[in-house]
C-alpha cells in the first residue's frame, strides 16, 4: 500500500467514524448507550462553534495527516473497530487517547481528545444541517433543524463558508503534496 493511500485511509477513517457516530446517536436505541447518547446530544446542543475552534480543528487534521505521512503505522487504532460507528463522545476520545500520534496531534493543535470529538460532531451536525437546508431541489430541503441542532452553529457554518473552504483547500494541498491527490 502506498503512502498516499495510507494517509487518505488514516484521515478518512477518523472522519468516517465521526460521521457515522453523529448519524447513529439519535437512532441508537440500546439501553446501554441511552444515557451516554443523551449526554452527548445535550453536549452537542450546548456546544457553540467558533472561528478559533475551526482553525484548531484544521490544525489538528493537518497534524494527523503529517503524522501519517511521517509514519504510516502511527495512526493504527483509529480505523473502524467493528462497532458500526456507534460510539459516544467519551469512547471516541478514548480511541484518540490510545493512539499516541493522534493524541499528540490534537494536543499540539490545542484540543483535548474529548474537545476534539465534541467539536467534530458539532461541526459535522451543523454542516450536514446547513447542507440539507440549502442544497438539492427546493422541495427536498429541510425547513426545520433536526432536534438538538443549535441554529447558531448552522448560521456559523453559513457565515464562515469562505474560511472553511480556505482551510479545507490548504488541507487538500498538503494531501496532494504527499501524492494523495486533491480529493479527500
Image (tube, rainbow, N blue to C red):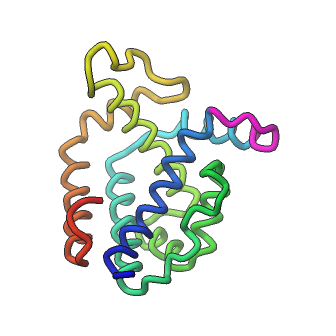
Residue 178's x, y, as percent?
25, 78
Residue 34's x, y, as percent?
75, 37
Number of numbered discs visible in the structure rendering: 0
Range of magenta residues: 27-35
- For image coordinates 48% across by 42% down, the residue present is 122
User: In the shown orientation, is residue 146 left or right of residue 60?
Assistant: right
| 105 drawn magenta | no
Judge whether 22 appears above or below 142 on screen.
below
Judge whether 59 appears above or below 32 on screen.
below
In the orientation shown, which residue stands out farthest toward the front?
Answer: 1
Judge whether 107 appears above or below 73 on screen.
above
Figure quadrant of the C terminus:
bottom left
Figure quadrant of the N terminus:
bottom left
- For image coordinates 34% across by 81% down, the residue present is 3
- For image coordinates 72% across by 43% down, the residue present is 36
Judge whether 139 appears above or below 116 on screen.
above
User: In the shown orientation, is residue 58 left or right of residue 145?
Assistant: left
In the orientation shown, which residue stands out farthest toward the bottom?
Answer: 71
When asked about the image quadrant of residue 30, the answer is: top right
Residue 112's x, y, as percent?
54, 63
In the orientation shown, which residue stands out farthest toward the right?
Answer: 31
Residue 172's x, y, as percent?
24, 63
User: In the shown orientation, is residue 97 left or right of residue 120?
Assistant: right
Name the residue nearer the viewer: 51 or 81.
81
Amino acid at each position: 500500500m502506498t503512502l498516499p493511500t495510507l494517509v487518505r485511509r488514516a484521515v478518512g477513517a477518523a472522519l468516517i467514524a465521526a460521521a457515522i457516530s453523529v448519524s447513529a446517536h439519535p437512532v441508537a436505541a440500546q439501553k446501554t448507550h441511552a444515557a451516554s447518547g443523551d449526554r452527548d446530544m445535550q453536549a452537542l446542543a450546548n456546544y457553540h462553534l467558533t472561528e478559533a475552534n475551526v482553525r484548531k480543528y484544521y490544525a489538528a487534521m493537518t497534524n494527523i495527516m503529517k503524522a501519517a505521512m511521517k509514519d504510516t503505522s502511527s495512526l493504527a487504532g483509529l480505523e473502524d473497530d467493528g462497532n458500526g460507528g456507534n460510539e459516544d463522545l467519551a469512547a471516541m476520545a478514548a480511541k484518540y487517547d490510545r493512539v499516541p500520534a493522534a493524541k499528540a496531534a490534537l494536543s499540539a493543535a490545542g484540543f483535548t481528545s474529548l474537545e476534539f470529538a465534541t467539536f467534530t460532531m458539532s461541526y459535522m451536525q451543523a454542516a450536514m444541517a446547513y447542507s440539507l437546508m440549502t442544497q438539492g431541489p427546493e422541495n427536498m430541503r429541510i425547513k426545520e433543524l433536526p432536534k438538538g441542532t443549535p441554529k447558531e452553529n448552522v448560521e456559523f457554518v453559513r457565515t464562515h463558508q469562505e474560511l472553511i473552504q480556505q482551510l479545507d483547500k490548504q488541507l487538500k494541498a498538503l494531501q496532494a503534496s504527499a501524492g494523495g491527490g486533491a480529493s479527500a
